[in-house]
Image (tube, grey):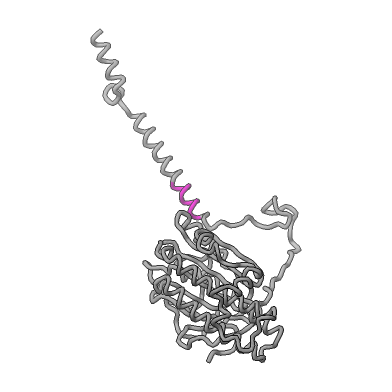
Amino acid sequence: ARVSGDRLTVLRSPQYVRFREGQWPLSGEKVPDLVSLTMGFSVQEDLDWPGLGAGSLFQRPRANVLIAVRGVGSLDLPSNASSYPLENPVPFTLDSVANTIHTLFAESTPVVLQLAPSQERLYMMGMANTVFEDLPVTLQQIRARLSQDGSVLHTLPLRSLSRNNEADLLFLSEVQVLHDICALLLRHKHLARDQAPDLFSLELAGLEELARRYGTDSSQFQDSTKILATALQKFADDVSGVYGNNAVVEVVTVKTFEAPLTRKARSILESNRGSNPGSPYNRAYKYNFDYAVIFNIVLWLVIAMALAVLVIAYNLWNMDPGYDSIIYRMTNQKIRMD
């Protein structure tokens, strides 16, 4: 049985990605950093979280799949899966991870998919436009998919769920999306063998709509949690099989996302002439993390050029034209002959 409250559960991970057993809380805003570290990428700030152990320096997962489930604090997932409490569940995106993949593997064929069916929000990059070309992404397309052959309506035990209610259809549409993603990945298994890692980010809000309509104690909500838990386990098994057990699959369950709290203040000592003339708010220039690298390159290049000019000038100053220069040597011989 899972502990109540928002959770981060790791359904699948390779052996070289070590998640330690424990109940160390993880802040919601650090989830993208956790995904970056599991994929072998560096982050701007160190992640001070003991749940992730040191991994292999020579292996990286071929894919990372993060599924955010809204409307429930925890699901009945396998007890052998690593699960951790989630604190401060603010909304997050994996845009930083997607940008890193795009920068490091621009010449390869990465598959990047970010999808939120309830909001009809979609972002695809790389080979995802080819792999998921036939994936229904809008609610209208997904509902039309439910009436076609191979629909989950023919295999799922609907029980108290109805095909005529909007909230029920939204939940079933999200389960259909999970099924279709696995089917398309199985069709393009060759892309899982390349060197570029793939990234998938899904946000499911069907349970949240069911809880708002029927309540968390209703039979519809209880049946939906069981269906989703089973669908997520099968989804994790299929994705892990496609990538040869070299994929990390995480599930984030939150009852509701909190709005990030920010505190804005203005100093009474603020001057009109700031360090950044282009900003009316006296903000400093944006710091570039490549500054130290660029500074060292320029510094040592200037020093090397200065030493080279000094050595060349010294040798030219002490050069004997009669012996060291072929021009003067030819001239002297010509004079002697004349």
Q: Quick one: 295 or 97, which is closer to the camera?
A: 97
Left or right: 302, with 155 as reference point? left
Relative vertical location of residue 301 with respect to residue 118 in this rendering, above or below: above
In the picture as drawn, the residue positioned furthest to the front comes out as: 149
Q: Give the mark count.
A: 0
Residue 235: where, in percent of width, then height?
Answer: 50, 77
Does 293 appear in magenta? yes
User: Which quarter of the rendering shows the C terminus?
Assistant: top left
Residue 246: where, in percent of width, then height?
Answer: 41, 72
**Res. 215 visible in picture:** yes
Relative vertical location of residue 329 with respect to residue 169 in this rendering, above or below: above
Residue 281: where, in percent of width, then height?
Answer: 72, 57
Q: Which residues are magenta?
A: 292-300
**Res. 54 visible in picture:** no
Q: State the residue at coordinates (36%, 29%).
A: 317
Q: State the residue at coordinates (58%, 76%).
A: 68
Residue 168: where, in percent of width, then height?
Answer: 66, 81
Q: Quick one: 326 or 217, which is closer to the camera?
A: 217
Does 43 appear in magenta? no
Q: State the residue at coordinates (51%, 58%).
A: 126
Could you say which quadrant of the image residue 282 lies in?
Answer: bottom right
Left or right: 266, with 330 as reference point? right
Relative vertical location of residue 271 with respect to residue 318 in this rendering, above or below: below
Relative vertical location of residue 24 with respect to residue 288 in this rendering, above or below: below
Secondary structure that dominates the magenta span: helix
Q: Quick one: 156 or 291, which is closer to the camera?
A: 156
Left or right: 20, with 178 as reference point? left
In the picture as drawn, the residue positioned furthest to the top comes out as: 338
